[in-house]
Image (tube, grey):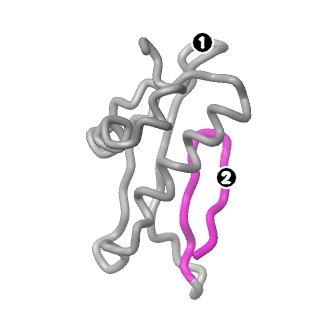
């Protein structure tokens, strides 16, 4: 699996070059961004792709010294499960 970055998303591409998942975000001022969607196509579910996408978004926030507002229900649940993500969560 290969993960690529665009300006407002990170996406996963399988060995065949097909895009199989993405996490999208939008800027919320200079110091925050909002995760608004995480999705993986049906045939690629159960491989940990969505979790990896959230992990990479958290790393992006750390690299850019930004906070994250996880509005996407999946991302929000990952933030609740993983204490290490909460350091970049806005309003913490």
Label the magenta part by its dominant secondary structure.
strand
Number of residues whose C-alpha sits closer than 10 Å to that of mark 1, classed few (under 14), some (14–19) or many (20 or more): few
Residue at 42 percent across and 12 percent down: it is 91
The residue range painted magenta reads: 1-14
Would residue 46 be found to the left or right of residue 60 on screen? left
Question: Image quadrant for the C terminus?
Answer: top left
Q: Furthest residue to the bottom?
A: 16
Residue nearest the observer in this picture, 27 or 90 = 90
Q: Which mark is residue 29?
A: 1
Q: Quadrant of residue 72?
A: top left
Instruction: Give how far across and how far down residue 34 sits, in percent.
Output: 47, 27
Residue under the point 55% across and 59% down: 11
Q: In which quarter of the image is the N terminus?
A: bottom right
Q: Is mark 2 on a helix, strand or loop?
A: strand
Q: How far apart are marks 2 and 1 (CA)?
A: 20 Å
Q: Which residue lies furthest to the right in this view?
A: 63
Question: Does residue 12 belong to the magenta stretch?
Answer: yes
Which residue matches tag 2? 5
């Amino acid at each position: 699996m290969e993960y690529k970055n665009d300006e407002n998303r990170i996406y996963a591409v399988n060995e065949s070059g097909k895009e199989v998942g993405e996490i999208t975000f939008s800027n919320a001022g200079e110091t925050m961004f909002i995760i608004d969607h995480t999705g993986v196509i049906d045939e690629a579910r159960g491989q940990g792709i969505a979790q990896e996408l959230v992990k990479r978004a958290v790393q992006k926030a750390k690299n850019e010294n930004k906070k994250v507002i996880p509005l996407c229900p999946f991302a929000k649940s990952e933030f609740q499960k993983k204490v290490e993500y909460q350091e970049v969560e806005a309003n913490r």
